[in-house]
Image (cartoon, rainbow, N blue to C red):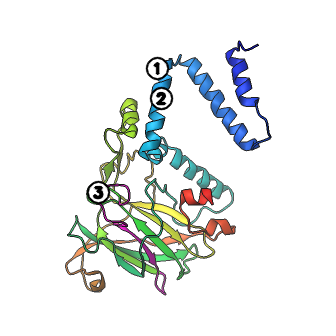
């Protein structure tokens, strides 16, 4: 009675239960388990290979790099593609393109009104620049209640709260736009960066023969009452990996134009005293179709709400 074939074992795994549980979870889990059973059989996966993979998953979870794997294997972009397709099917394909959030968002960054010096209090770090623009709806109407959350890597490709030695909320701010729905911030042009070496993520990418580099980019989460919360990121032109992002996140319409040698006049409140590089970019938001779409939440918080 206990001598099972592979097919019988799979059937028991997928059908055994003492309560109804969640039908959707049961259905999805059954598909995943069935596909893994088939994979093990088709590729003659050996016990040592299987348990090495289990060890890798354990180390991946402990490292906090699960979000790098989901991005690097295309799952984050896949979800965006599916949402884009749904928007086109329902006539909602408008506004600033969404882009992946990545695993390094931190809520409750310091709040400023209208403008902020992102790297205030630090020594000069790379090429100074100011990014500015407005937050508007798809008809160009200003949204003076909008909030622009911005975060990017430091000059060594590290993010505060995820790398030792960095000040809390370094290079992370929330900007409540002014009465004309304008925002602007001063920082430096961030570099691209690579996944951590000697890590579970790098082990997989080495085995796959892939690089783990991201082009220079800046993250945003933009929200406003009654509007669909926008998660996106812009890319800095000229980066070697702009068309070869390991996370597949580069998108048309999100590669900004640099305006070098911009005169400092009018930017004195940001401490600008010499010519700098400027980026002008307006965030264009859609009307929310339901209340949940307008919650100013990041990916994980939205899923767990």
Q: Earlier in the sequence, mark 1 or mark 2?
A: 1
Viewer-side residue, 262 vs 144: 144
Secondary structure category for the residue under label 1 = helix
Residue denoted by label 3: 191
Instruction: Tell me which segment is drawn in magenta.
Output: 160-181
Q: Earlier in the sequence, mark 3 or mark 1?
A: 1
Q: CA distance from mark 1 to mark 2?
A: 9 Å
Viewer-side residue, 253 vs 211: 211
Q: Is residue 50 visible?
A: yes
Q: Is residue 147 left or right of residue 129?
A: right
Q: Earlier in the sequence, mark 2 or mark 3?
A: 2
From what the image shows, is residue 1 above or below residue 106?
A: above
The dot on residue 53 is: 2
Q: Is residue 72 visible?
A: no
Foreground disc of the pair 2, 3: 2
Secondary structure category for the residue under label 2 = helix
Taken as a whole, is the magenta stretch helix, strand or loop?
A: loop
Residue denoted by label 1: 48
* Residue drawn 59% across the image and 18% down it: 41
């Amino acid at each position: 009675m206990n001598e099972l074939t592979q097919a019988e074992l799979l059937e028991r795994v997928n059908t055994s239960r003492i309560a109804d549980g969640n039908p959707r979870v049961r259905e999805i889990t059954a598909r995943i388990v069935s596909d893994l059973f088939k994979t093990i059989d088709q590729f003659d996966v050996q016990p040592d290979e299987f348990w090495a993979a289990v060890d890798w998953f354990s180390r991946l979870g402990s490292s906090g790099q699960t979000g790098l794997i989901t991005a690097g294997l295309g799952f984050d972009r896949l979800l965006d593609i599916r949402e884009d397709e749904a928007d086109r099917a329902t006539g909602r394909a408008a506004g600033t393109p969404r882009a992946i959030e990545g695993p390094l968002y931190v809520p409750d960054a310091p709040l400023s009104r209208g403008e902020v010096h992102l790297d205030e209090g630090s020594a000069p770090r790379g090429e100074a620049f100011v990014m500015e623009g407005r937050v508007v709806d798809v008809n160009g109407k200003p949204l003076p209640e909008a909030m622009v959350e911005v975060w990017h890597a430091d000059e060594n490709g590290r993010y505060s709260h995820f790398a030792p030695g960095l000040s809390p909320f370094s290079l992370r701010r929330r900007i409540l736009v002014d009465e004309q729905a304008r925002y602007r911030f001063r920082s430096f042009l961030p570099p691209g960066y690579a996944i951590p070496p000697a890590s579970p993520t790098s082990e997989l990418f080495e085995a796959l023969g892939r690089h783990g580099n991201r082009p220079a980019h800046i993250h945003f989460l933009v929200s406003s009452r009654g509007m669909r919360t926008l998660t996106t990121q812009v890319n800095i032109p000229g980066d070697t990996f702009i068309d070869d992002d390991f996370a597949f996140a580069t998108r048309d319409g999100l590669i900004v134009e640099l305006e070098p040698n911009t005169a400092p006049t009018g930017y004195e409140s940001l401490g600008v005293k010499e010519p700098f590089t400027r980026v002008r970019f307006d965030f264009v938001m859609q009307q929310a179709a339901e209340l949940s779409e307008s919650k100013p939440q990041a990916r994980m918080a939205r899923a767990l709400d």
